[in-house]
Image (cartoon, grey):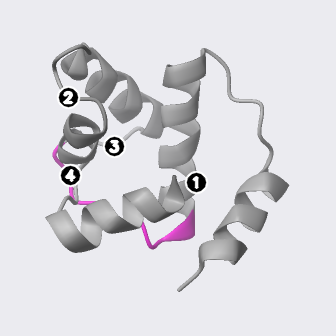
Amino acid sequence: MIIILYHYQDQYDLHTISSIISRWAPQNPNNTQRYIKFVSNSMNINAIQRINVYVPSTLFNLLRSIILYENGEQPYGSTTFNNAFTLVKK
């Protein structure tokens, strides 16, 4: 998922929660606006505010929010996110 988020930012110039989630979960078959609102509220960031997924704290908060929305729970601790980040770090 980290690689996909990097790709969204680098290849598609997606730098907001709104643009990232719109690509991740397009309107058909999703309720994209509800998804954007959930992630935005979870991260306490305006959906159209520019973010940088290369900032670990931003990346981890985005991952946590997406996982929580997708699964209804977010079972992964900081160690899991740090290990994943280390594996794909540029």
Q: Is residue 56 left or right of residue 81?
A: left
Q: Report x, y in % for residue 34.
A: 27, 15
- The secondary structure type at the circle numbered 2 is loop
Q: CA distance from mark 3 to mark 2?
A: 20 Å
- Seen in the picture, residue 83 relative to 71 is either above or below; the reply is below
Residue that mark 2 sits on: 26
Q: Could you say which is closer to the camera, residue 12 or residue 65? A: 12
Which quarter of the picture shows residue 6?
bottom left
Q: Based on the picture, tell me whether residue 31 belongs to the magenta stretch.
A: no
Q: Which residues are magenta?
A: 48-56
Q: Is residue 7 left or right of residue 27?
A: right
Task: Give the number of callouts.
Answer: 4
Residue that mark 1 sits on: 60
Q: CA distance from mark 3 to mark 4?
A: 7 Å
Q: Residue furthest front?
A: 29
Residue type indicated by callout 1 = Phe
- The secondary structure type at the circle numbered 3 is loop
Q: Is residue 84 left or right of residue 48?
A: right
